[in-house]
Image (cartoon, helix red, strand yellow):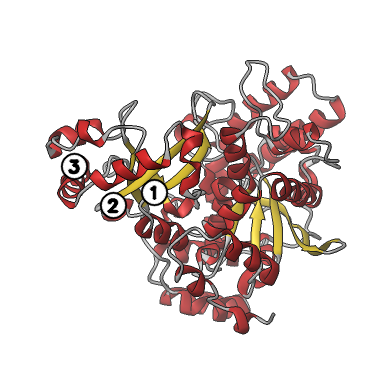
Amino acid sequence: LPLRQIAFKQIGFLDKKMIDLDTAKNELKERGLIAWDLETTGIKLFPKDPGGPVKIEFIRPISGAFLLETEHGFEILMDYKAGLAPHILPSPVALAVNGINPHELFDSSLPTQLEFAEAVSDLLQDNVPILCSYNGIGYDAVVLRHFLFENFRNPYILSDFNRVHIDLYKIAEAIYAIDPHTLNFPRKPNGNVELRQQMLAKANGIDTGTAHTAIDDTQVVLELGKVFREIAPDIYFSAIASGNKHRVIHHLENEPIVCHAYVERFTRKGKVRALTLIGQNPIKEMSNQYLTFDLSYDPHDYLHYSSDEIAAVIKKKDSPFFELKVSDNPILLPSNYCEKGGLSRQSARERAAMIDENFKEKVNQAMKQKGNPFADYPIDPYSESKLYAEGWPKDTDLYERFLASDIEARRELLPRFTDLRVLDFAKRIIAQAQGSLESEEYHEYLGMCRSRFFAKSSDVPHMTYDGAMAQIDQIIAMDHDEEVVIPIVQFYEDLKNKMEKKA
């Protein structure tokens, strides 16, 4: 159906009090499904990792694919590959895994990052089908958000009210937690469950094609989705019913009991919890966090606690208080899954009824006492790091005019930008369009590129020359073929020589 005929269809969805799987099935039938995947310059790294630390805000897409599911297979909506801007350094490990010669990423004939961002934004602008990815909510969507932010596009386009996004990684976790025998789950050498997309697909007879290419990985997403829909329809359609934060909040606020199935981060064991809502975190910066009470615990043991005592228990191991980040679209299952967590529905109802407003208010006070644990964390002095720190981007009314203008007209618009993040990005766009021409913006940009390239990796949140060298040592130790490693080494050495000459 045309967009305007089904826009805000979910308002009808939110009229329902219960998690209605039939409504979710009808919605999938009416809206359709788009699977998507990005291949990127690397992954988030920590100080202990070779090349780290690298924050996700500095990772950029190399390619992307969006496929529409059809009766006969799929229709390719986008299969896009773009070059990198000079200030973006790819991870040698990512290049080795993907088999990419980094020189190809700086080919001037490739579309630019700016053009890539425009193509993705245009595709998603009036996109009403349900979006489907694998680990997309925790990774691809975050990369996309910062990518669009840097390229004068709406970074929150995936957070629109009517957007629905299901993450097959979360569905795989829920299947494993509820019944690990439903699917062939491979194991890692240490015995932990293996949930990486390629490994799970191969274990279940799905052809993975050329791994780590956007188009083939997106086809795998579609095939895995079909398997999940067939073997675990309740979980799959519950994911649609929980497909954006508005739906998650609606169900938490209107249902006395919801269930949540996932794999614990450190133990890697499946867990099913029966939950009842306590309330939204009152700290503004943490408003996406909703606190629930795990009904496997007896509320009688906690109702007499003071707010101080509750504050001491929140986030502790074996705490009855369990946080859900609603913007991550956690899958909420109907209350009949209580038994999978070892609790009868009758016991769950009785315990949920004990949670009164007085107890909720004490918990609310406890959350205020705990405050924002990240409030005193320093903010990186880079525009890429400030999407959340400085709020919604300003000057968005200038975006289209700026992008449609020639270089001189763009330069004339610079004084009108009041958002220093946006002004920084505008100058980069001008500098990249000018290439080697003499200009203040180009020399400022070149200085930034050199500074980032030669910085010590331990001091900055992005890839650097010495961080790349550490990763090159790693891929050599991993016995990658010389035809893969040599171009990567040559690329970084060539870039180092160019940067030194331009000093």
On the image, the x and y values in percent for residue 10 come to 52, 71
- Dot 2 amino acid type: Gly
Q: Which mark is residue 366?
A: 3
Q: Which mark is residue 257?
A: 1
Q: Which residue is mark 2?
A: 279
- Please report the residue visible at 75 percent of the width from the left and 21 percent of the height from the top: 476
Q: Badges 1 and 3: C-beta atoms under 8 Å apart? A: no
On the image, the x and y values in percent for residue 221 come to 73, 49
Quarter of the figure that contains the N terminus: bottom right
On the image, the x and y values in percent for residue 333 come to 51, 48
Give the vertical position of 154 relative to 19 (above or below).
Answer: below
Q: Is residue 406 left or right of residue 13?
A: right
Q: Nearer the viewer, residue 478 or 212?
A: 212
> Badge 1 local density, few (<14 within 10 Å), some, or many (20+)?
many
In terms of secondary structure, where does tag 1 sit?
loop
- Please report the residue visible at 54 percent of the width from the left and 66 percent of the height from the top: 157
In terms of secondary structure, where does tag 3 sit?
helix
Give the vertical position of 449 relative to 251 (above or below).
Answer: above
> Badge 3 local density, few (<14 within 10 Å), some, or many (20+)?
many
Quarter of the figure that contains the C terminus: top right
- Dot 1 amino acid type: Ile
Q: Nearer the viewer, residue 37 or 387?
A: 37
On the image, the x and y values in percent for residue 398 come to 49, 78
- Dot 3 amino acid type: Ala
Give the vertical position of 187 relative to 410 (above or below).
Answer: above
Give the vertical position of 300 relative to 412 (above or below).
Answer: above
